[in-house]
Amino acid sequence: GGRAGAGGTPKAAPKMYVCYLCGKEYGSKSISIHEAQCVKKFEDQQAALPREERKRVPSRPCLGESAASLEERNTMAKQAYEEQVMVACAGCGRTFNGQDRVDMHMKGCDAAKELIQAAGGGMREC
C-alpha cells in the first residue's frame, strides 16, 4: 500500500510537471522556479559554444485559452524538449542533449562511421 495521510487515507502521488528545457519532472510548486534556473543554464551552455553551433532558448509550449490537463501539458513539454533541445546522430538517429554529446557518440557509432565513409569524409575532430 501507499503511505497514509491524515485520517489513515492513502496519499495521492504528487503531480509532476515536465520541464520543456531539460525533460525532467518537478513538483507543481517548484516547476516555475526550476524553469527560470533551467533557462539561465541553457543560455550559459549556449554562450560557451561557437556562434554557429548555438541554439535559441526553446519556447515554452503554448497551452492556448483552454486549460490543458496535466497529461496534455507534459506531452507538449516533452515534445518541445525533443524537437528543440535534443540533437540526433546522423548515422543511427539516436538523440542526445547537446552537439558535444552527439560528437562523442559518433566516435563509436558504426552507422555514423559508415555514413561518413560513404560520403568520403573523415570524422570531425573535436
Image: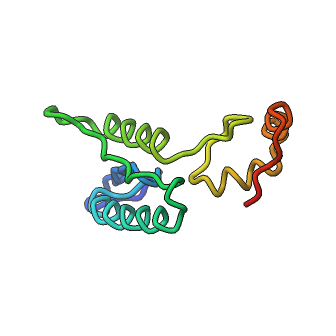
Where in the figure is residue 35, as x and y percent of width and height? Answer: 33, 60
* 29 sits to left or right of 41: left
Q: Residue 77 appears at what percent x and percent y? A: 38, 43
Q: Which quarter of the picture shows residue 7?
A: bottom left
Residue 8 placed where, x, y %? Answer: 31, 57
Foreground of the two, 103 or 12? 103
Vertical arrangement, residue 107 with respect to residue 78, above or below = below
The correct choice, above or below, for 4 with respect to 81 in the image is below
Q: How is the image coloured?
A: rainbow
> How many dots with numbers?
0
Q: Position of residue 119 (x, y in %)?
A: 80, 32
| Vertical arrangement, residue 32 with respect to residue 87, above or below | below
Q: Residue furthest left?
A: 65
Residue situated in front as seen by the camera: 111 or 54: 54
The one nearer the camera, 12 or 72, is 72
Identify the residue at image location x=81%, y=35%: 111
Could you tell me which residue is drawn at 61 percent across and 48 percent down?
96
As drawn, is 34 to the left or to the right of 51? Answer: left
Residue placed most toward the observer, 79 or 50: 50
Is 24 displayed left or right of 33 in the figure?
Answer: right
Asked which quadrant contains residue 84, the reply is: top left
Residue at figure coordinates x 18%, y 34% from the top left: 64
Q: In what quadrant of the picture does the C terminus appear?
A: bottom right
Residue at image location 86% in from the left, 36% down from the top: 117
- Judge from the rendering whether residue 99 lies leftward or rightward of residue 68; answer left or right: right
